[in-house]
Amino acid sequence: MRFNLFKKNKTESEKKEDNYLTLRIRETVRETPDTVTVYFEQPEPFLDYKPGQFLTLLLEIDGKQERRSYSLCTSPFVDPFPGITVKRLKGGLVSNYINEHFHPGKRVTVMKPLGNFVSDYHSQNKRRYGMVAGGSGITPIMGILKSILVNEPHSETHLLYCSRSEEMIIFKEAIETLHEAYPGRLRVWHQLSQPGPAWAGACGRMDKETIKSFFSNLIESRELETRFFVCGPEGMMATAKTTLRELGASEESILSESFYLEKEVNEPNEALTELVSRPVTIVLEGEEHAFDVEPGKTILEAGLEEGLDMPYSCQSGLCTACRGKLLSGEVSMMEDAGLSEKEIAEGFILCCSSKPSNSEVKVNIE
Ligand SMILES: Cc1cc2nc3c(=O)[nH]c(=O)nc-3n(C[C@H](O)[C@H](O)[C@H](O)COP(=O)(O)OP(=O)(O)OC[C@H]3O[C@@H](n4cnc5c(N)ncnc54)[C@H](O)[C@@H]3O)c2cc1C
Ligand code: FES
C-alpha cells in the first residue's frame, strides 16, 4: 500500500536545506594521539546551536553513506567557529576516517544541530554545576562549561574528568586556561585509569568513592541550585548517576548524554516477535507517505526502504535525529534513551527504535 498526498510544493533542494547544511572545514587540531578537533567555517547564516548539542555527519566512505553524531565542543557564546572532537575507536570506520582524512577546505554535509544535553544561561543565575566526564565525553561538557563561565559570574563549576593516561587528556591545556581565567569558579579533578610514572594526581577508575568525595559537599550544602552533566562510557555514567542519586541529587538535576549503548543480544522483545505487517503513515515535510512495516522492522527501516529521506543517525535510540511526534496509534519503543521525559509525555517517538503496535500509527517528522 502506498500513496502520497502533496500538501506543500517544496523542491528536493528546499527540503534538503531545511534539514542539512554543508560545512567547510577551517582547521583540524590534534588534541591527543587519537583525538582530533575539527573546526568548521561559519555558514551563512551562522550555525544556530546550543552548547552540548551535536552534529550528525553524512559521509561517503567506500561508496556507502555513513552517518555518525559528534557533539559540538565549542560554545556559540565564546568560540567564533563551531567544532567537533572525534576520538578514534579501535576498528571504528568513521572515527578513524575523520582522524585521517579530514583537512582544511573539505566540505562535509551535516544535519542541523540536535540534542537535549543543554542548559539555560543567565547572568543572574547563581548555581552549582557538577560535571562528570570520561574520555571523549568531555566534548559536549567543554561547550557547556565555557558557556557557564562566560555567562554566569555568580555560578560555580566542578569538573571531575577521567582519562586513560596523561597524554590522553583531551583539552588539558584549554581546561587549565579556563581554570586560570576564572579564579575560584572552576574546580577540576583529573583522574587517570592508567597513569604514567610521572603522574602525581589521582589514579584508578572513576568509582563511587571518587564521585562521593568530589560532590558530597556540593549536594549537602543546599544553598544553591545544583545541576549535573554526565557524559562518558556507559559503565562510568551508570556509576555516576547512581552515586549522585544516592547523595541526594534529584532525578531532574542530572542530565546525561550517551554516545553508545551496549546492546543485549537475543534479548526477547515482544515487538520483534510480532508477526503481522502494519500500515504506517509518515508526515515528512508536510507530505504524507503511507507504507507497511514488515515484522521485525522498525518504522525508520521500513521508511528508508520505501525511499523516504527520513532523518536518522545512530539508529540505536540515542541521538534523536529520527524523532517524530505520534499523531495517532500506538508504537512499541525499544530504546528511548535520547528522549527527555517531557518529550515522551508529549508523544515524541524515535522512529529507529519504534514498531507499530496497531494499524492507526501516524507520525509527524518536522
Ligand atoms: C549523541 C552522540 C554524540 C556523540 N558525540 C561524540 C563525540 O563528541 N566524540 C566522539 O568521538 N564520538 C561521539 N559519538 C560517537 C560517534 O557517533 C560514533 O559512534 C563513534 O565515533 C564510533 O563510530 P565509528 O564509525 O568509528 O565506529 P563503528 O564502525 O560504528 O563501530 C565499530 C565497533 O565499535 C562499537 N562502538 C561504536 N561506538 C562505540 C563507542 N562509543 N564505544 C564503544 N564501542 C563502540 C560498535 O558496536 C562496533 O562494534 C557520539 C554519539 C552520539 C549518539
Ligand atoms: S537515529 Fe538516533 S535516535 Fe534514532
Image: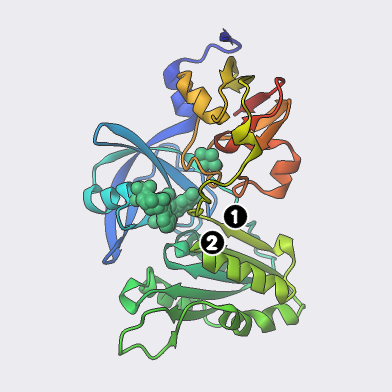
| Residue 157 percent coordinates (x, y) | 58, 73
Can you tell me whether the CB of the residue at mark 1 lies under 8 Å from the nearest atom of ligand 1?
no
Q: Is residue 277 left or right of residue 301?
A: right
All told, the count of numbered labels is 2
SS for dot 1: loop
Tell me what residue is drawn at x 50 percent, y 79 percent. Answer: 188
For residue 264, say whether it is visible: yes
Q: Is residue 35 left or right of residue 353?
A: left
**Badge 1 local density, few (<14 within 10 Å), some, or many (20+)?**
some
Choose between 182 and 349: the one closer to the eye.
349
Q: Are marks 1 and 2 in contact (CB under 8 Å)?
A: yes
> Which numbered dot is residue 144?
2
> Which numbered dot is residue 118?
1
Question: At label 1, which amino acid type do we have?
Answer: Val
| Residue 82 percent coordinates (x, y) | 41, 51
Image quadrant containing the N terminus: top right
Q: Is residue 14 left or right of residue 257?
A: left
Tell me what residue is drawn at x 44 percent, y 25 percent. Answer: 16
Question: At label 2, which amino acid type do we have?
Answer: Ile
| Residue 238 percent coordinates (x, y) | 59, 65
Image quadrant containing the C terminus: top right
SS for dot 2: helix
